[in-house]
Every structure is written in C-alpha cells, then in structure tokens.
Image (cartoon, helix red, strand yellow):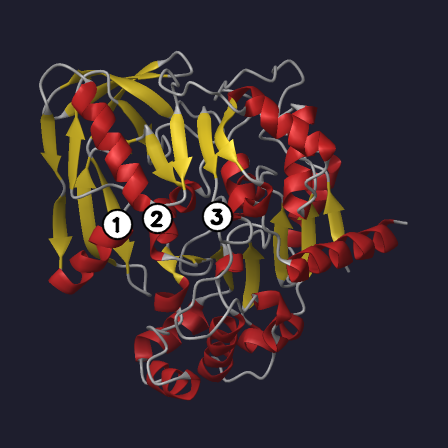
Amino acid sequence: MSILISLLARSPKTSNNEQDSSQQYILTPCQQRALEVLNGDSNVFLTGEAGTGKSYLLGQFLEGKGTKRYPVVASTGAAAILVGGRTFHSFFGLGILEGGVESTISRALRSRKLIDRLIQADCVVIDEVSMLSGTVLETAERIARKARDNDAPWGGLRIIAVGDFAQLPPVDDSVSGKEWGFLHDVWQRSQFIPILLKTVVRTHDMEYLKLLQSIRNGDVNSDVEEYMNSKVINNTDDFEGTRLYPHRASVDAYNLKKLDELKGKLWEFTTAYTGKESYIDILRKKAPIPEKILLKKGALIMIRKNDTSHKEPQMIYVNGSLGHVHRISEDTLEIDLLTGRRIKLSKQSFDMLNGDGDVIAQAYNFPVNLSWASTIHKAQGATIDRVLVQLQSLWEPGQAYVALSRTRSGDNLFLESWSAGSIIVEPMVQQFYERLAQETVQTTE
C-alpha cells in the first residue's frame, strides 16, 4: 500500500520571489489523510522530493508527544545536533559496529539503559533514513527485537522513517559500496507504508520545479541544457548569496578571502565546549559552527538554527537564512536578513545527546557561520536564500540534485559552471521511486 500526498503549503498570494517566513501553511485533505496514517500504528516511510514539506508534516505529528515515547533519531551526528535529537547509532547502541554485526548486537544488549529505553519507546522517528545502510538498519532491528523480547519487526517498536533516497547516499565505513537501505531484507521486513509527498512547497516556480524533477531523474534533455546555460553568470565577483562547492578546502579559502576584503574590526568568538573531552572531539567535527567564528561588519552569514521563539511555521528565521552583519558586540549580533528584516541574535548552544537523550557535550557560540560559500553536503536540509553552484567534478549520486534544490525559486539560483557528467543518478533509486509511484496509482484508482 502506498499513499500519494499532494501538499499545499503556501497562500496563493505568495509570489515566486517572496521569501516571507510568516507565510501560512494549510493542511489539505490529502495531508489530513497522511496525518491519519502517521497517527495510526503502522510503520511508515515518509518520503518525497526536496522541499515537499516532510519535516513540517512530521512536526505536526510529533507536536505534544514526549521524547521518551517518541524519540527522534538522526542518521548523522551533524543532523542530530541541528534537530536537537540523538543519533541512530547512539540510540540503538551500535557504536561503529566494532567487531561486526554479531559483536555489536551482543555488546548493545549488555546495556540495561539501552534495553530500558527501547522498552519505554512506542515509536522511533528516523530522520534522513536514506543515509543509513541496510546493514546498520538490520543490526538495529535485531537489537530492538531481542531487547523487547518480541519477534515482530523491530520487536513491535513502531518506526517512522523519513528521507529521500534521491539525495545524498549512505556513508558507512563498515560496509563496502553504497548499501541502500531499501534494498536490504530489513526494509521489506519492516513493512513500511510509504507516504509519498509529491507537491513541492518550497517553490511555486514551475519552470524551476520542472528542472529539479529532470535532474532528480537524471534526464539532461535540451530543456535542461537551455535552463542551466541561462543560469551561468560570467562575472561572479558581485554575486550576493552562498556559493556551493563540492570540496571543503574551496569553501574555507573563499570565505576567508571575502572576509579579508572587508574593512573594519575583526571580531573573534571562540566556541565554548563542555563535556568529556572524547565527546567534545566529536562535537567539534559535527557541530554546524566552527571552533572560532571570525566576523566583521558587513560579513555574509548563514544562520544555523531555527527561531524557537516563534511557533513554526511563522518563524523570523530558519536554518539556512542569509544576512549581513549590521552590528557586533560581545553578546549580540544584529543581522540584516536578505529578506529585509533586521534581527538580533544571542549566543546559543548546540547539544550532543547520548542514546538516553541526556546532554553529553555542548558547543556554545553565535549560531552562525560565514556563508559566502558552503559545501553541498553541509547545505543538505537547508533552504538558502540565494545560491551560486559550481556543478563540476561531482562524484556522488544526488549531489547535483541537492545543490540545485536548496533555494525557493529559480530566480535565486545561479551557476558558476556545470557539466552533464556531474548529474549522477542511481538507477536503483529511480526504480525504487517508480515502483512507489506505480503502487500509488493502483491504490488510488
């Protein structure tokens, strides 16, 4: 069974170019049906193209639910820190699968805390499930069955898996190659009901949407070539926005170059870390802010947290909002957002949690980083106001799609260069989504 959900999330009065964070989100009857499925007792795979509102719909489901019974776990440490959740590996006691699957399961089941939290949980939400390998999923599923002493899939623990397999693939040092989760026996055993979100709500720009759909499918036709060529700008010196590069070295060099060009006082804010040194070492690598934040008045920054003082979706800013630094003090930043608003930011903490949801390390600083440039990997999950993409020499399936789908409108997308060879699609992923679409048609007819 598969359910096709059309998502309408913006008022029709909102234009392509508007980036009004006060926009109203309205659940359609189809979305209400999706919530009914989420509020049921089946395992669910919530998926869809970039910008289809997966996170928003999930937020509606989780509202008012406690984290012990409804823990949210993320596939990577960086994602967990951003969403204030735990990693999948820590929640299920996987570590780095030292010694292989059997040793990992045996070691995990010696933890009374792990067994207790798996018994207490009613439903686990897995964010960015596409970045978990089948081996990792299977290991966790077997641990859950044994911990809960129940032979049902996941030991009767309900699973809501969220993600898009057409984006960046799983990274798992314990297995060779790309081991997509949906190809593994554990995926079939989990008996997921797919909820396939089809309507992109990040943009109402139909030409841009058509491009993204073609890129997602790896279809570099004449229309795509014409569109991409029209987005190439020859003189990039005056570009105002974030440049997306495939390599970290290019990002760091460009950000420091642009900062050095600004006049005025250079401010340096050292990130304060607390916790055990071993955890701090991990947090330094995973947190979305650097160990030292260098700023000058006029610097272009990206905000790396959502505005928690306003109830979603009526936020003043979100993770990915861009702005220029207007004023700097030791405790406050004033930022002129590219949307036209001026906001004040104080220092905030980015928390690393253990499997039980306890804070084991914190990074405390302003929730910003220099954003004249960013890596494509770091940009996944963010909606960026204006992007300039270097689409050359990419190597991962879905990398081009992630880069091109970061903004709300084609008006805010620009290319430094591009090559058709960098648009890489995994055939098995295409076949997987084709099957979902076919099942949906059969279900709704």
Mark 2 vs mark 1, CA separation in Å: 7 Å
Say which of 341 and 355 sits in front: 341
Q: Which is more N-terminal, label 1 or label 2? A: 2
Distance, label 3 to label 2, CA atoms, is 30 Å
Mark 2, residues whose alpha carbon is within 10 Å: few (<14), some, or many (≥20)?
some
**Residue drawn where x is 46% and y is 42% of the image:** 381
55 up-or-down from 228: above or below: below
Marks 2 and 1: CB-CB under 8 Å?
yes
Residue at the limit of the structure toward the right, as seen here = 445
Q: Which numbered circle lies on residue 394?
A: 3
What kind of residue is marked 1? Answer: Asp
Q: From the image, tell me which residue sits under label 1.
A: 351
Q: Is residue 274 above or below residue 1?
A: above
| Closer to us: 433 or 341 | 433
Which x, y percent locates residue 404? Answer: 54, 35
Pointers 3 and 1 in contact (CB under 8 A)?
no
* Foreground disc of the pair 3, 2: 3
Secondary-structure class at tag 1: strand
The residue where tag 2 is placed is 84
Relative image position of residue 316 (x, y in whole percent): 40, 22
